[in-house]
Image (cartoon, rainbow, N blue to C red):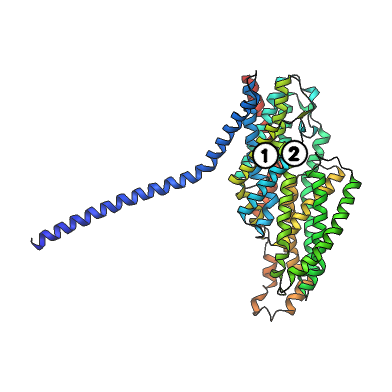
Amino acid sequence: MTHKGQDAEGAQAALRKTSLDKDLQKIARVEDATRFLTRKLFAPGLAILFLAVAGIFASIQIGVQSNAALIVIAAVLGGYMALNIGANDVANNVAPAVGSRALTLTGALIIAAIFESCGALIAGGDVVNTIAKGIIDPALVPDAKTFVWAMMAALLSSALWVNLATYVGAPVSTTHSVVGGVTGAGIAAVGVAAVNWTTMSKIAASWVISPLLGGLIAALFLAFIKHNIIYRDDKIAAARRWVPVLLAVMASTFSCYLVMKGLKKVWKFDYTSVALIGVLVYVVAWGALKPWVFKQSEGLENRNQSLRQLFHLPLICSAALLSFAHGANDVANAVGPLAAILDTVQSGEISARVGIPLWVMLTGAAGISLGLFLYGPKLIRMVGEQITKMNPMRAFCVALSAAITVIFASTLGLPVSSTHIAVGAVFGVGFFREYYTTHSKRRRNYVNARRNDLNSENGEPDPRELRRRKLVRRSHFTVIIAAWLITVPAAAALAGAIFIIISSFV
């Protein structure tokens, strides 16, 4: 064979090889695109499957009866609301622990799902108000049919609003969403006169009071830690003195919080009993934690990062307890309207308070847990990592502030939002850090005294740079505050529109 023939054959082989490579690359790109789409469609697909199962489960539970289709639709809407509560609201309970690296994201999801479900099923209560927070007078609703469609509209609108808030990355109050939905549907069904505006004014006041109070308390605890532990010459000695006190305060506070919010539907408490429980738990916890802190601090280096491990276990416990109390309280946001629809359809009458069947509670608990796993990580990362930088001590202040603020507000009878409080505490920690970094003489003196140990002239930023430094992301602050302000009116407007549309077809 001539050289020319060999060259021609080689060129053809190279061409065939190039074509084959191109085909293989196309197949690989198709496979990559398929995997990408599969990952993107997995969560929505699983959520839709859950809603289908919720509807089938409801039909099995109620059997063959008139208006069964209404109950099935309500069960699907209740499941949808539960998914959104898990995706949005639960993040506040575990986000600080995740952001401070005390918990991994996977660990936080597992703990939150278990304790949310336990709170819903053990202490979620068997009775719920048919009209959220007493906003609408049931006596003014003309008939059962109007009431059922109003509850449908309220449930769908609040779920859609929380879904939108989760999509844009804004942690909002699901309670306020339900309040807005009930208000809008009630106005559309009965008129403005049906709204209890005194109750609505209290809820509006809580928009301002709860995040400010949560932020203030968190900032005060952080100031105490900085003053008494962080900027001390002997940090270990300071930690051995004050960390048992702080952890005992947390144990006492969370015992009161659990009784007042997590177990209130299981045990009817009085404030004297709660106070005695708090004092007793504080004494026992302090006695047990003092030797524990001493043992844990042995061998630690005299620096801030060494102190952080003392707060890891308390943060894990706080995430579990906050999740339990949240499940006990907020499952009603998903299943309350569903229970009201079920009772009204079956009895033909409108009741002020109705029982919650076990299957309804199971639907709510399962939906919250699934929503947390599918969509919760987005809000957990945002609250725990993106608003401001967290460490275990700052996260401790946030968790403790959330519990104290809820207890204080409940004692005063204020209808506060745990979401607003927790996120407000995160903002409070961040803004306090900004202020303390630039204005604290103790910090300045501490840093100046150790400038040589920091091993450079750049160990401490220029004062002008400190004044420009922003430790809270303003973009998140703006989006979240805006979402809070419009939650009730937006959910109300959406519910009113949905009710009017439904009324025109039925």
Q: Secondary structure at mark 2?
A: loop
Q: Position of residue 297 (x, y in %)?
A: 74, 70
Q: Inspect the image, locate mark 1, and give the three-letter code of the amino acid beneath it.
A: Ala
Q: Secondary structure at mark 1?
A: helix
Toward the viewer: 278 or 229?
Answer: 278
Q: Position of residue 406 (x, y in %)?
A: 80, 48
Quadrant location of the C terminus? top right
Q: How many dots with numbers?
A: 2
Evaluate whether residue 342 shows in this view. yes
**Residue 459 found in image quarter:** bottom right
Quadrant location of the N terminus? bottom left
Task: Looking at this view, name the residue that lies furthest to the bottom.
Answer: 452
* Image position of 374 (left or right of 95): left
Mark seen at residue 124: 2
Q: Inspect the image, locate mark 2, and give the three-letter code of the amino acid beneath it.
A: Gly
Mark seen at residue 21: none
Label pair 1/2, CB-CB below 8 angstroms: yes
**Residue 260 found in image quarter:** top right
Mark 1 nearby-residue class (10 Å; few <14, some 14–19, many ≥20): many
* Image position of 304 (left or right of 245): left
**Residue 220 found in image quarter:** bottom right
Q: Position of residue 20 (x, y in %)?
A: 27, 51
- The residue that disc 1 covers is 365
Evaluate whether residue 130 shows in this view. no
Toward the viewer: 236 or 391?
Answer: 236
